[in-house]
Amino acid sequence: MNRPTYILHYAPDNASLVIRLALEEIGADYRTHLVDRHQTQQRSAAYLALNPNGLIPVLETDQGPLFETAAVLLWLADRHGGLAPAPADMGRGDFLKWLFFLSNTLHPALRMLFYPVNCIGTDPAHLAQLARATRTQVTRHLGILDTRWQEPRALGLDLYLCALLRWLALYPVSDDKSWFDLRDYPALLKTTKALESRASVGAAQEAEGLGVTPFSAPQLPSPPEGSAT
Ligand SMILES: N[C@@H](CCC(=O)N[C@@H](CS)C(=O)NCC(=O)O)C(=O)O
């Protein structure tokens, strides 16, 4: 049997979701390899050999293992087209600035909500302060994105943005989510609904148990294998 072009190391509903959606959109030949988070496999020697940061995802390619969600997304877009304007196209600059905003600003803010102990330790007062500050920051970012998403953006951006919005609504599971309501951001809500009609989302829903409205009104996943956290 031929080796597939790509191997996606994933865990359900993790950042690998963005890359799965991208691979589905470009019709790539790929298979997946589950990273079992219950066993903390992202810190195993075998996984660290692929991504020394111990973070999901990794995409194995003919150029070696690639990591960092935005880098993988950009690499796939440049190699296969369809996800973003090509380097010489009008709109490339706009695509890059928002891609980097999502990956350098919004995604790290979410990581502060999801993994606060890594940033500030276990003191409850410090954790509460970090949560307050990060929520304020994320609310501001979402307001900006809602204004900018009045006009349609490149598909690659929508894939990343909609996954971030999904995680904001769901994680951490124990958190009070009253501070975030997607209906406060009409352009973003519209974007999530539009994405849900795409075949790539159907494939990801099935593979990762994402439920019926995975971006506009997400429910916790019920994956056929592995776990999200
Ligand atoms: N900057 C990384 C962040 C990826 C990331 O946050 N991955 C999470 C899952 S969504 C992860 O690996 N978490 C496990 C851990 O931190 O141990 C990227 O863009 O790929």
Image (cartoon, helix red, strand yellow):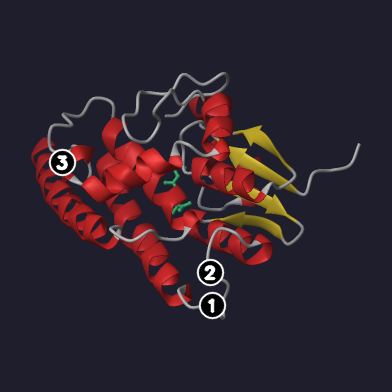
Q: Quadrant of ligand 1?
A: top left
Residue at horizontal 16 percent and vertical 50 percent from the top: 139
Find disc 3 in the rendering and name its residue.
127
Do the residues under discs 3 and 1 have CB atoms within 8 angstroms? no
> Which type of secondary structure does the marked residue at label 1 adopt?
loop
6 shown above or below 150: above
Q: Is residue 26 visible?
A: yes
Q: Position of residue 148 (x, y in %)?
A: 27, 62
Do the residues under discs 1 and 2 have CB atoms within 8 angstroms? yes
Disc 3 marks a residue whose amino acid type is Leu
**In the image, is the residue at mark 2 within 8 Å of ligand 1 by its beta carbon?**
no
> Which type of secondary structure does the marked residue at label 2 adopt?
loop
Residue at horizontal 51 percent and vertical 21 percent from the top: 223
Disc 2 marks a residue whose amino acid type is Pro
> Which type of secondary structure does the marked residue at label 3 adopt?
helix
Kindly report the distance in space between the C-alpha atoms of the residues bearing marks 1 and 2: 6 Å
Which class describes the residues within 10 Å of circle 3: few (<14), some (14-19), or many (20+)? some
Determine whether, in the image, residue 161 is placed left or right of residue 148: right
* Viewer-nearest residue: 19 or 27: 27
Find disc 2 in the rendering and name its residue.
85
Find disc 1 in the rendering and name its residue.
89
Q: Quadrant of the N terminus?
A: top right
